[in-house]
Amino acid sequence: MVPTVTAIGNRKGGVGKTSVTLGLAMGLSLLGRRVLVVDLDPQANATTALEAEGEFDIFDVLYGGEAGTLGQAIVQTSWKGIDAVPGSESMSRIESEVLMTPEMRLKTAAWNSVELEAYDHILIDLPPALGRLTLNGLIWADRVMAVTEAAAFSVRGVTEFLETVDKVKSLPHLNPELEFAGLIINKTSAPLTGEHSYQINELQAEYGENVIMPVIPQRTAMQDSVSSRMPLTKLSGPGAAALTEIFVEHARRLDGGK
Ligand SMILES: Nc1ncnc2c1ncn2[C@@H]1O[C@H](COP(=O)(O)OP(=O)(O)O)[C@@H](O)[C@H]1O
Ligand SMILES: [Mg+2]
């Protein structure tokens, strides 16, 4: 079994990268897939939400010289069917460090991890930056998805993020095989406001089929899921049910392209 590795990013913070990563993980696990979430963001919000704690975290793997392989840092989370490699605040140091081929560390750590063969999908929650950490994710990933709000600033973040993706694809020693798996629009108003409809149309004009439907509406259940550290399936109310259905649809698409 070779897992599909999908990196989820945007240059901008707060657009929902972590929430969408967790939603997709939940959706894939509902489809019966084995999922591993790799938290590459120094803020480690996905780690907190998943209650992923273990002896090692991503920093130990890449810089500790102890763990060495990604597999050794894998922990079970409190979310059914989802494992994780916990993130670490220390990862912010990597952004500014200068070393030989430091962008290859994650891929190298994955290379020797037989443990990864247990998964169908690996989702990488990227930080809101285009530095070394994001490059580590993009160089290892098979696919990349972007998440955006229907607002001008987040859209610019997508453009910058995808320019970095193009750079990674254009260099033979980086990741020419990296595939753009689409753009998810998050936090839309229901019903859609004029501004949101306008931005969605603009995104469709620019990215065409790559804009993945349905859009994900703004619902408090999304915040509740992260703050209560529980998947949407464990929350009651129409918002949680509606979001679960949407994430299963996105998960099916992600899984189908395997
Ligand atoms: N569809 C949504 N509806 C409501 N709140 C959302 C939605 N998506 C994300 N949020 C909230 O927006 C904030 C930022 O989301 P997060 O996933 O942490 O973004 P990022 O990882 O891109 O920084 C969080 O408080 C999160 O709960
Ligand atoms: Mg995040």
Image (spheres, grey):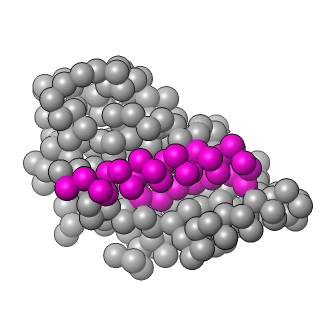
Left or right, 54 with reference to 49: left
What is the magenta range? Answer: 144-172
Q: Is 62 inside the magenta-drawn segment?
A: no
Residue 31 visible within the image: yes
Q: Measuring from the top left, give residue 148's x and y in whole percent.
A: 63, 52
Say which quarter of the image contains residue 93. Answer: top left
Q: Is residue 225 above or below residue 232?
A: above
Q: Measuring from the top left, give residue 242's x and y in whole percent.
A: 72, 67
Q: Please report the residue visible at 76 percent of the width from the left and 53 percent of the height from the top.
A: 219
Of 115 and 43, the residue lying toward us: 43
Q: Please report the residue visible at 60 percent of the width from the left and 74 percent of the height from the top.
A: 208
Residue 236 visible within the image: no
Q: Please report the residue visible at 56 percent of the width from the left and 62 percent of the height from the top.
A: 183
Left or right, 1 with reference to 96: left
Q: Measuring from the top left, give residue 66's x and y in whole percent.
A: 13, 26
Q: Quadrant of the N terminus?
A: bottom left
Which residue occupies the extreme bottom position in the image? 256
Of 115 and 63, the residue lying toward us: 63
Q: Magenta stretch: dominant SS? A: helix
